[in-house]
Amino acid sequence: MSTIRTVTGDIDPNQLGICHPHEHLIGAPPPPYDSQDPDLVLEDEAAAIASVRELQAAGGRALVEMTPIDYNRDPLALQRISQATGLHIIAITGYLKDKFCRPLVEKQSVELLTRRFIHEVKHGMDGTDIRAGAIKAASSLNEITPAEQKVFEAAAQAQLATGALISTHTEAGTMALEQIALLTGLGVPADRILIGHMDRKLDADYHRAVADMGIYMGFDQIGKPQYASDADHIAMLQMLIQRGHLNQIMLSMDIARKRYLPVYGGSPGFAYLLNDFVPLLRSTEMTDETINVMLKENPKRALAIET
């Protein structure tokens, strides 16, 4: 039997619906980064609820809230947002890149990190009974630092103990192949790995090499033209689909700044993926069946935990 672990309890995977697999609702970088870049500080639950309702109006039914331990994760706030809106929210355990995680993990053993990740998936986070539904690990630009290596090793052991998906951060799309080699070398099945931010590095040869490893690929920067245009996204998706990788692709927006949210006067907002990008996919004669595989079926399969 399989389940998807949300902040309000486990659900049948068939209940998930359209899912954004890499987003942020509540969180903030630790000092001094919070004051250096206040655009990253998302602490207003009412604003998060308003943003969630925009996503729901567009057809979204779930998201994975990727804010980790070292970024002021707030499981109780996520639970309240889910209860207020009915959106399925999957929280995560794990850490972000070296810049944030090193002060917290450098003096901890891999064993201690592993025990925490397992506890948070099986029992609850931060003294609550709200359980994580996935595990996060991250690398820096063009390197995996010693602190990050620890997190990857602990994430791998926790994955093997829980069955939960490992969802990663790649800095500007780099180090995907190295992340995969590290995790699979530690025994993690390829289909339990989602490599994030692949669309920060839209190089066809790179994408083919990553896709051939059999992992899930996150195209999670949609609606951010400073990184890639919609047309560039579509061209890469078409190439991968033509090569038989449809069942590995997921779409999201990674909204982690006020300037992306209409409630703060920003854009494009959570609705952009479904209201704007999906119609562009349809205009290329991509079928609704194909689109639904990326929006619904792949997240449903990836997030399912065998119990």
Image (cartoon, rainbow, N blue to C red):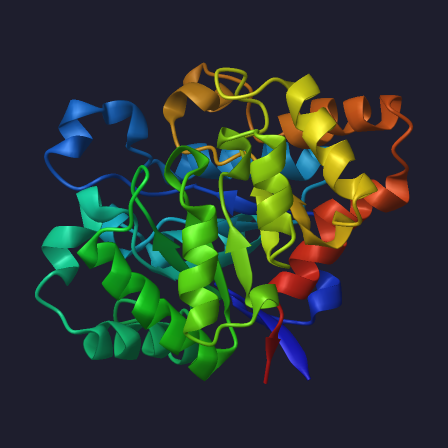
How many discs appear?
0
In the image, taking residue 171 as reference, residue 105 lies left or right, namely left
Is 303 located above or below residue 160 in the figure?
A: above
Quick check: can you spot residue 16?
no
Q: Residue at x 47, y 76 (%)?
A: 187
The quadrant in which residue 2 appears is bottom right
Whether residue 299 is visible, yes or no, is yes
Q: Residue at x 50, y 71 (%)?
A: 164
Instruction: Report the front residue among 279 and 151.
Output: 151
Residue visible at 26% across and 39% down in the picture:
28
> Is 229 on the left or on the right of 274, as rendered?
left
Q: In this view, does 50 lie above or below 98?
A: above
* Residue 234 location (% of width, % of height): 72, 27
The quadrant of the image that shows the C terminus is bottom right
Q: Residue 111, how many percent across, how many down?
A: 22, 79
Q: Is residue 158 above or below residue 107?
A: below
Name the image quarter holding the N terminus: bottom right
x%, y% of residue 197? 49, 39
> Residue at the location (45% across, 37% down)?
173
In the image, taking residue 145 as reference, residue 157 lies left or right, namely right
Residue 177 spot, x, y in % from top left: 47, 51
Seen from the viewer's position, the closer of residues 149 and 14 is: 149
Residue 80 position by quadrant? bottom left
